[in-house]
Amino acid sequence: MSEARTAGDLGPTEGETASAESDTSLVVVTGLSGGGRSTVARALENVGYYVVDNLPQALLLDMAELAFKAGGAARRTAMVLDVRSRAFSTDLAGAIRELRERGFQPRVVFVDADDEVLIRRFESVRRSHPLQGDGRLADGIAVERTLLEEAREQADVIIDTSHLNVNQLRRRVEELFGGEDARRLRITVISFGFKYGLPPDADFVMDARFLPNPYWVPELREHTGREEAVSAYVLGQEGADAFVAGYADLVNATTAGFEREGKRYLTVAVGCTGGKHRSVAIAEELASRLRHSGIAANAQHRDLGRE
């Protein structure tokens, strides 16, 4: 199970004035080695945070101020600290306090796990604990627990990963920091021409070449599948509607599973000979149907205008 303790929004202390820095979303990630810091960092990246790994504690304020000044995407910054960071400073409590005095509102995430679980994780990857020295894994874990005791006490969120797999931990972090939109699967439906090669990032490939080619209709040849006349011609052909509907059902049936497995972007490629008529019309229609069913989808056309 995961244990979460959320302190909520941490405003300036009494007598202090909230500054624009409070608009900068800062997350400080720390915790036991082997507890899952790297997974937490990747999950934060998934939901739009700029992640700085292995940042010395003494540089927390400098990094926060850089994030504030940079603006844009950097306004959501996560800073990951581990035992190596403590070579520069061991005063995490003081660093967090200094951030708050300057008007920032950092949320501290602490990842933890049972000793037995941590030992199994280290043994499975055949790594030594960074603090065990000449001793046993258990000795290194014990030393680290003592060093991080104060950090755990002041954490806003504590996640016990003892019984969480990677995907469950990722979902937990995304639920805490991402919001619904950040966790949703985004689908790009891309049209292409087979004569120019397959899109290398395609997850699904649809072949629309079974449909009559508007290229051989003189009044449609110079137009594209984004135009009404060509679109109506393509979608009006026998089998076209069933073709699009079938793929829409397939994508709809897989999105929940892809989201559970941590996939955030899916590419559906629709091909015809040159990527101008059939694939373009089909891609636009499929993207429209997916949006209608509540999926974030957009259409792109790789080879349009290439002829």
Image: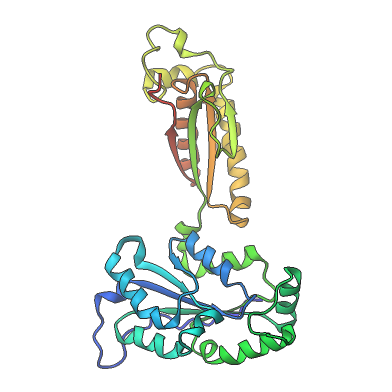
Q: Judge whether 179 appears above or below 243 on screen.
A: below
Q: Is residue 158 visible?
A: no
Q: Classify residue 288 as left or right of residue 203.
A: left
| Location of residue 290 in the rendering, given as x and y in whole percent from the top left corner | 50, 40
Colouring style: rainbow
| Location of residue 155 in the rendering, given as x and y in whole percent from the top left corner | 50, 84
Quadrant (top left, top right, bottom left, bottom right) of the N terminus: bottom right
Q: Is residue 256 visible?
A: yes
Q: Classify residue 238 as left or right of residue 280.
A: right
Q: Judge whether 150 appears above or below 279 on screen.
A: below
Q: Judge whether 126 appears above or below 256 on screen.
A: below
Q: Quadrant of residue 181?
A: bottom left
| Location of residue 58 in the rendering, given as x and y in whole percent from the top left corner | 41, 83
For image coordinates 50% across by 54% down, the residue present is 184
| Location of residue 242 in the rendering, given as x and y in whole percent from the top left corner | 59, 26
Disc count in the image? 0
Q: Nearer the viewer, residue 294 or 43?
A: 43
Q: Judge whether 28 appears above or below 266 on screen.
A: below
Q: Quadrant of residue 148?
A: bottom right
